[in-house]
Amino acid sequence: MLRSKAITCLIKPTSRLGISKIPISPFSQTTSTQDQTQTPILQRFQNVSKKDKITVLVSKLVDLENTKEAVYGTLDAWVAEEHEFPIGRVKTALLTLEKKEKWHKVVQVIKWMLSKGHGTTIGTYGQLIRALDMDNRVEEAKRLWGRKLGRNVELVPWKVCEIMVYVYYRNEMWKEVVKLFEELEGYNRKCTDKVIVERVAESYEKLSLVEEKEGVMVKYKSLFSKSRGKYGRKSSKELSKIVVSR
């Protein structure tokens, strides 16, 4: 299975699925759409190149109703003839759905992938947290953070911590922004992103903590006097290899 170098950098090697060959019959049944039109699900993905399969899948997902049964059934049909889980193409499909701002579908695809035992990395959970927030499910995003990542925040890369800071900030949860930032600093983890520093400073201001706001701006003043670099940040390749226990 061919994968682009860009996708290969984002994923880890995957193991074979427990089922070496999936019968076509369960997926060849017709499904009814809202306009009562019946279309064989699996037939949509047969005799199509791997590249075109992604386009067909995304198009199909965008048009589907937002039910677990409909989305999971389509995804199961999509991988029915694969000998290995096509995680590279799943990641590509997710990026396309994100660009289209189909956040509910992003959430469903990630949860389906995780249910298959694939993509259980910190990067995937960060992507899911962001999608949940953008789908206006901030409480679910918070619970996922607390259950999967927040307990060992000292090990979570800044790139993912920034996602959670943004979630709190976007939802005006000023105390949570400050708490997470101070917790990270407690582990001697210095922020390298001036945008995050600005958000933290604003959160202090919203909480009427003027001295703390001034303190953080002074501490990170070097970020505002030179261009931002990548020093101290984990690459996407490193991030994708950090597996999260289920």
Image: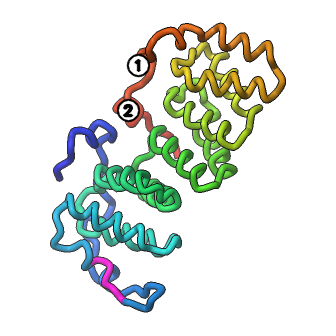
Residue 51 left/right relative to 89: left
Give the mark nearer the N terminus: 2 vs 1.
1
| 93 versus 31 height, above or below | above
40 vs 202, left or right, is left
Q: Over which residues does the magenta segment extend?
A: 38-42
- Image point 38% across, 72% down: which residue? 74
Tag on residue 236? Answer: 2
Q: Is residue 55 magenta?
A: no
Look at the numbered disc 2 and give the secondary structure of its residue.
Answer: helix
- Give percent across and percent down for residue 144: 61, 46
Could you tell me residue 24's position as x and y percent? 26, 79
Residue nearest the viewer, comparing 138 with 218: 218
Q: Identify the amino acid type marked 1.
A: Lys
Q: Is residue 116 positioned above or below 157 on the image?
A: below
Q: Identify the residue under disc 1.
A: 230
Image colouring: rainbow
